[in-house]
Amino acid sequence: MPSNQRLSLIFALMSLGLFGCDDSPEFWHPETVVSGLPVHGVHGLSFGPDGGLYIGSVMGQSIVRLDLETGALEEIITAPLGEADDIAFGPDGSMAWTALNQGELRIRNAAGEISTVANNLPFVNPVTFGPDGTLYGATLFGPDRLWAYDLKANTSRVVVENIGGLNAFEFGNDGALYTPLPQRQAVGKIDVETGALTIIAEGVGNVVAVKFHPDGFLYGVSWDDGRIIRVDPNSGESSQVAEIEPPLDNLAIAPNGMIYVTRSADNGIVAIDPQDGTSRTVVRSDLAAPGGMTWVNRNGTQQLLITDIFGYRFFDPDTGATEILPFDLEGGASADVDNRDGLIALTYVRRNRVLLKEASSNSIRTKWANVSQPYGVLIEPTGSVLVASHDADTLVRLFPDDPDKRTVIASSLAGPVGLAWATEGQSVYVAEVGSGTTGGRISEVNLMTGGQETVAEGLDQPETIALLPDGRIVVTEVGANQVSAIHRDTGVKTVLAQNLAIGGLISRAPDPIGMPTGLAVDQDGAIFVVTDANNGLVRLIRE
């Protein structure tokens, strides 16, 4: 329909009071097909004085408490204050944690008051209390540096620096601070008065956390290969206790000697018996910090490829099974996806990166760096890749055979996030969350001319879009926690589902979007929505 005819139709509908929202609501039944957890990637881990196991998340910027007897999870510190790569409890019951991306060391006192102990600490990682209540924190890179904070006197000092990448550490009974040194593949101890370092074990691999066990030995976890090791602090002799699926980030040891480990890729807390090396999963979720998704043909069936900060994974709607690929931060971490002709295109907004991969071999064909806040992605029939650059307000074309060549197709968009084909190879729909005085809207962009036409406006944080079999555009309105359908020609909007657990803050991703809310429609018209607030997946079926 030509634009002038469409406008005439819209004006006529407005005069009849029919433009905007449909007076005949549809009923879509939400069915949970993947259950989740209210934590986005698990990192820091520590037992509190109340016996609860406290879990920190860097990506989800929150701290939760796990009751090991009931399995109940309770959010203790919400985003963004709760970003926690490591957690420690002081003699007086106060809780300290490190906000790695925000560069702050924070503390909550026994009265529940939260304050910042120190800031401007890039990659601040481990934290612990000394026997006298002094707080110790360290930066992991540039340079690695151990700080001591006298909380009563409000003073600080550098203990030592440039010793090999300090990570999650703990004091021994001898008053020394025992620490992994992953850059040296070693474990050492530090005299916190003099800064003197003594290496006690070498060749232990990429150990990123060590804690003392009631048996007197140090136990550590290796990030990339899933090993749990035991180290004799006197002789330096080390041995492997167990091996589980990586990546492993931290550990805490219960009074009864059971070892608990965080596994980020599936939000897993794994319990390990050091006596025989047996393990059991306490909690986990198939999705860790999910984003956009698309349909792929895999093993002869239609499956959903769901992006995730900890690596994309596949969901089979027929069996309900989720397959998590081996951990690959460089090739798997992603925020949105498209596929065509045996190729997979992945954007990753947290690192301003776009990848084009061979689906069969999982190998990277082309990598684009420094693509400003890339979200939605489409592979064109020609093989070029379209990307929504959020903060640049542009739609950009990338060329696999010439990674340095980039063409701006459309500018003056308003915070673009999601993309979907309007007419394949010719025009695309763009979901724009809005910026400045511009509210949320959906535009159609002509790929030949760059021309833009507003399809719908007045939307509440529209992030992702797809097409229903009847031609309507389905959109996630994250600001309203709902999914809506919009008639292309009339602009009539129908709310399909409300009160969905969508939206949430993610570190190093644009607020308020974080990871885009995944959306896909199957061939029968069922709508799949990633409920990223709880790392789940629901299917909406029309009643």
Image: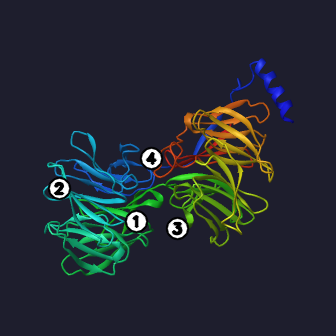
Residue pictured at 79% horizontal, 59% vertical:
381
The residue under label 4 is: 38
Residue 263, percent from left and from top: 42, 62
The local crowd at label 2, few if under 14, some if 14 to 19, many if 20 or more residues have their Cα within 10 Å, is some
Amino acid type shown at disc 4: Pro
Residue 300 image label: none
The local crowd at label 4, few if under 14, some if 14 to 19, many if 20 or more residues have their Cα within 10 Å, is many
Q: Is residue 480 above or below residue 91?
A: above
Secondary structure state at the residue bearing disc 2: loop
The residue under label 3 is: 328
The answer to which image quadrant residue 338 occupies is: bottom right
Residue 519, percent from left and from top: 64, 47
Q: Earlier in the sequence, mark 3 or mark 2?
A: 2
From the viewer's perspective, tell me whether residue 59 is left or right of residue 299: left
Secondary structure state at the residue bearing disc 1: strand
Amino acid type shown at disc 3: Asp
The residue under label 2 is: 134
Residue 443, percent from left and from top: 71, 40
Q: Earlier in the sequence, mark 1 or mark 4?
A: 4
Q: Give the Cα separation between the discs numbered 1 and 4.
A: 19 Å
The residue under label 1 is: 248
Q: Earlier in the sequence, mark 2 or mark 1?
A: 2
Amino acid type shown at disc 2: Thr
Secondary structure state at the residue bearing disc 3: loop
